[in-house]
Image (tube, rainbow, N blue to C red):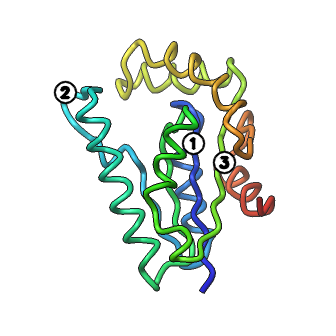
């Protein structure tokens, strides 16, 4: 059975989680992992130890999903704002062993759209005040990652997911 690994990255507020949930519904025999589930801590701390831990968690789960004969499509959504993060994940997965195709996609949006989306999350108490600035600072990085770019500005999650499926790499 041919397998596809979808690595869906993008800054906070671009719609990664909801788009990946749509992909999970649209793609046959699929499983989804939100990288944030592997690092849901309070207080949230970014240290060398916690970075190593979250990558171990993500790679362990993705490796198990890829090796499982039940799944054809494995989806990861996570910030992945540096090529080194993508390369680290791919280097630790059984891509060849599982004969998996890799689709690395970066979701982006224009700055006004990102401000609006993340600002709504801040007002709802889901993100801290610094989230808007962090998201905007990460946005330019995605254009240089060598991934497929999909602009989510003005689109519904289902439409973004359909574009990813239709583009087929």
Residue picked out by circle 2: 43
Q: Are marks 3 and 1 in contact (CB under 8 Å)?
A: yes
Whole-angstrom CA distance, mark 3 to mark 1, is 6 Å
- The disc at residue 9 is 1
- The nearer-to-camera label among 2 and 3 is 3
The quarter holding residue 147 reads: top right
Left or right of 125, for residue 75? right
Q: Residues within 10 Å of mark 1 (few under 14, many from 20)?
A: many
Q: Residues within 10 Å of mark 2 (few under 14, many from 20)?
A: few
Whole-angstrom CA distance, mark 2 to mark 3, is 30 Å
- Label tally: 3
Which structural element holds mark 1?
strand
Which structural element holds mark 2?
loop
Q: Are marks 2 and 1 in contact (CB under 8 Å)?
A: no
Return the disc, 2 or 1, that comes first in the chain's sequence.
1
Residue picked out by circle 3: 105
Return the disc, 3 or 1, that comes first in the chain's sequence.
1
Return the disc, 2 or 3, that comes first in the chain's sequence.
2
- Outermost residue to the left: 42
- The disc at residue 30 is none
- Going 42% across and 51% down the picture, which residue do you hit? 34
């Amino acid at each position: 059975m041919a397998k596809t690994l979808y690595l869906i990255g993008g800054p906070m507020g671009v719609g990664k989680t909801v788009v990946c949930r749509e992909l999970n519904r649209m793609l046959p025999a699929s499983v989804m992992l939100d990288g944030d589930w592997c690092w849901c801590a309070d207080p949230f701390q970014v240290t060398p130890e916690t970075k190593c831990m979250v990558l171990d968690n993500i790679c362990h789960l993705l490796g198990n999903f890829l090796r499982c004969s039940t799944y054809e499509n494995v989806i990861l959504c996570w910030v992945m704002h540096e090529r080194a993060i993508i390369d680290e994940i791919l280097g630790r997965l059984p891509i060849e062993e599982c004969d998996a195709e890799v689709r690395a996609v970066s979701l982006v949006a224009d700055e006004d759209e990102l401000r609006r989306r993340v600002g709504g999350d801040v007002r709802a108490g889901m993100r801290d005040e610094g989230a808007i600035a962090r998201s905007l600072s990460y946005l330019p990085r995605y254009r240089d990652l060598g991934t497929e770019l999909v602009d989510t500005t003005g689109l519904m999650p289902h439409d973004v997911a359909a574009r990813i499926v239709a583009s087929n790499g």
